[in-house]
Protein backbone atom coordinates (compact mmCIF):
# COMPACT_ATOMS: atom_id res chain seq x y z
CA UNK A 1 0.00 0.00 0.00
CA UNK A 2 1.38 3.40 -1.01
CA UNK A 3 1.35 6.02 1.73
CA UNK A 4 2.57 9.58 2.03
CA UNK A 5 5.24 8.40 4.46
CA UNK A 6 6.99 6.64 1.55
CA UNK A 7 7.92 10.01 -0.02
CA UNK A 8 10.25 12.66 1.44
CA UNK A 9 8.64 15.41 -0.68
CA UNK A 10 4.90 16.01 -1.15
CA UNK A 11 4.66 18.73 -3.79
CA UNK A 12 1.30 20.55 -4.16
CA UNK A 13 -0.26 20.44 -7.63
CA UNK A 14 -3.79 21.76 -8.18
CA UNK A 15 -6.30 20.18 -10.48
CA UNK A 16 -7.73 22.44 -13.17
CA UNK A 17 -11.17 22.63 -14.71
CA UNK A 18 -9.71 21.46 -18.03
CA UNK A 19 -8.24 18.31 -16.40
CA UNK A 20 -11.65 16.60 -16.31
CA UNK A 21 -12.73 14.60 -19.31
CA UNK A 22 -16.23 13.85 -20.62
CA UNK A 23 -16.70 11.23 -17.89
CA UNK A 24 -16.17 13.78 -15.10
CA UNK A 25 -12.79 12.60 -13.85
CA UNK A 26 -9.20 13.64 -14.50
CA UNK A 27 -8.11 12.18 -17.83
CA UNK A 28 -5.31 9.61 -17.65
CA UNK A 29 -2.78 11.65 -19.67
CA UNK A 30 -3.07 14.50 -17.18
CA UNK A 31 -1.35 12.44 -14.47
CA UNK A 32 1.85 12.65 -16.53
CA UNK A 33 1.53 16.42 -16.47
CA UNK A 34 1.26 16.30 -12.68
CA UNK A 35 4.47 14.22 -12.54
CA UNK A 36 6.32 16.62 -14.85
CA UNK A 37 5.10 19.70 -12.98
CA UNK A 38 6.00 18.33 -9.55
CA UNK A 39 9.49 17.12 -10.52
CA UNK A 40 10.50 20.32 -12.31
CA UNK A 41 8.91 22.69 -9.78
CA UNK A 42 10.61 20.82 -6.94
CA UNK A 43 13.97 20.92 -8.79
CA UNK A 44 13.69 24.69 -9.24
CA UNK A 45 12.76 25.13 -5.59
CA UNK A 46 15.39 22.74 -4.21
CA UNK A 47 18.23 24.13 -6.35
CA UNK A 48 17.23 27.81 -6.23
CA UNK A 49 17.99 27.75 -9.96
CA UNK A 50 15.94 28.18 -13.08
CA UNK A 51 16.79 24.78 -14.49
CA UNK A 52 15.97 26.01 -18.00
CA UNK A 53 19.17 28.10 -17.82
CA UNK A 54 21.52 25.16 -17.18
CA UNK A 55 23.76 23.94 -20.05
CA UNK A 56 22.39 20.40 -19.56
CA UNK A 57 18.67 19.79 -19.72
CA UNK A 58 16.64 16.91 -18.33
CA UNK A 59 14.59 15.20 -21.02
CA UNK A 60 12.01 12.57 -20.16
CA UNK A 61 13.19 9.19 -21.43
CA UNK A 62 10.60 7.04 -19.69
CA UNK A 63 7.42 7.46 -17.75
CA UNK A 64 4.70 5.18 -16.46
CA UNK A 65 1.60 5.39 -14.31
CA UNK A 66 -0.52 2.93 -12.35
CA UNK A 67 -3.97 4.25 -11.48
CA UNK A 68 -5.31 3.50 -8.01
CA UNK A 69 -8.29 5.84 -7.72
CA UNK A 70 -10.21 8.55 -9.48
CA UNK A 71 -9.56 12.29 -9.30
CA UNK A 72 -11.77 15.18 -10.33
CA UNK A 73 -11.62 18.96 -10.34
CA UNK A 74 -11.45 20.68 -7.81
CA UNK A 75 -9.46 18.01 -5.92
CA UNK A 76 -6.32 19.25 -4.19
CA UNK A 77 -3.30 17.08 -4.84
CA UNK A 78 0.15 16.34 -3.52
CA UNK A 79 2.70 14.55 -5.66
CA UNK A 80 5.11 12.41 -3.68
CA UNK A 81 8.71 12.34 -4.94
CA UNK A 82 11.62 10.08 -4.12
CA UNK A 83 14.70 8.97 -6.02
CA UNK A 84 14.75 5.33 -7.09
CA UNK A 85 18.08 5.62 -8.92
CA UNK A 86 20.68 8.36 -9.26
CA UNK A 87 22.99 7.57 -12.16
CA UNK A 88 25.73 9.39 -14.04
CA UNK A 89 23.43 11.08 -16.57
CA UNK A 90 19.96 10.04 -15.41
CA UNK A 91 17.64 10.24 -12.44
CA UNK A 92 14.77 7.82 -11.90
CA UNK A 93 11.96 9.17 -9.74
CA UNK A 94 9.30 7.14 -7.98
CA UNK A 95 6.16 9.25 -7.76
CA UNK A 96 2.68 9.08 -6.29
CA UNK A 97 -0.35 11.31 -6.72
CA UNK A 98 -2.33 11.81 -3.52
CA UNK A 99 -5.72 13.49 -3.16
CA UNK A 100 -6.17 15.60 -0.06
CA UNK A 101 -9.04 14.20 2.00
CA UNK A 102 -9.33 16.35 5.09
CA UNK A 103 -6.23 15.73 7.17
CA UNK A 104 -5.14 12.65 5.25
CA UNK A 105 -3.84 11.90 1.77
CA UNK A 106 -5.40 9.19 -0.37
CA UNK A 107 -3.25 7.55 -3.07
CA UNK A 108 -4.71 7.95 -6.57
CA UNK A 109 -1.73 6.82 -8.70
CA UNK A 110 1.88 5.75 -8.60
CA UNK A 111 4.42 6.32 -11.32
CA UNK A 112 7.95 6.37 -12.59
CA UNK A 113 9.71 9.22 -14.34
CA UNK A 114 13.23 9.11 -15.81
CA UNK A 115 15.15 12.28 -16.62
CA UNK A 116 18.22 11.87 -18.83
CA UNK A 117 20.47 14.91 -18.85
CA UNK A 118 21.66 15.95 -22.29
CA UNK A 119 23.73 18.77 -23.71
CA UNK A 120 21.46 21.68 -24.57
CA UNK A 121 22.79 21.88 -28.13
CA UNK A 122 23.95 18.40 -29.14
CA UNK A 123 21.30 16.45 -27.19
CA UNK A 124 23.98 13.90 -26.26
CA UNK A 125 23.89 12.51 -22.69
CA UNK A 126 26.07 14.38 -20.18
CA UNK A 127 26.74 14.24 -16.47
CA UNK A 128 23.91 15.43 -14.23
CA UNK A 129 24.63 19.08 -13.33
CA UNK A 130 26.11 19.35 -9.82
CA UNK A 131 23.29 21.57 -8.54
CA UNK A 132 20.72 18.97 -9.68
CA UNK A 133 22.70 16.06 -8.23
CA UNK A 134 23.02 17.79 -4.85
CA UNK A 135 19.24 18.31 -4.70
CA UNK A 136 18.49 14.76 -5.86
CA UNK A 137 20.77 13.28 -3.20
CA UNK A 138 18.43 14.69 -0.54
CA UNK A 139 15.69 12.34 -1.83
CA UNK A 140 17.74 9.13 -1.86
Image: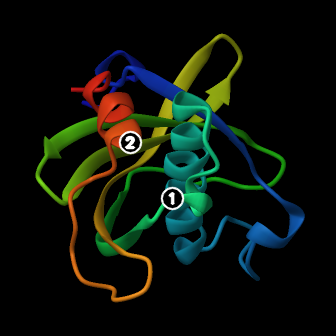
Q: Residues within 10 Å of mark 1 (few under 14, many from 20)?
A: some
Residue shown at 84% from the left, 72% from the top: 18
Residue 1, image quadrant: top left
Q: Is residue 59 above or below residue 37?
A: below
- Outermost residue to the bottom: 122
Is label 1 in a helix, a strand or a loop? loop
Q: Residues within 10 Å of mark 2 (few under 14, many from 20)?
A: some
Task: Residue 124 in the image: state x and y as whole percent.
Answer: 24, 83
Horizontal placement of 28 versus 27: left or right? left
Which numbered disc, 1 or 2, marks the residue that appears first in the sequence? 1
Residue underneath mark 2: 132
Nearer to the camera, 21 or 114? 114
Tell me the mark number nearer the camera, choosing from 1 and 2. Answer: 1
Task: Residue 77 in the image: state x and y as whole percent.
Answer: 65, 38
Residue 19, image quadrant: bottom right
Horizontal placement of 51 versus 68: left or right? right
Amino acid sequence: MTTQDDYPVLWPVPTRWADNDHYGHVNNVTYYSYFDTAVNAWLMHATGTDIRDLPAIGVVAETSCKFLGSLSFPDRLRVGLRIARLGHSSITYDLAVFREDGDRLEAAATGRFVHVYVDELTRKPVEIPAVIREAAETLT
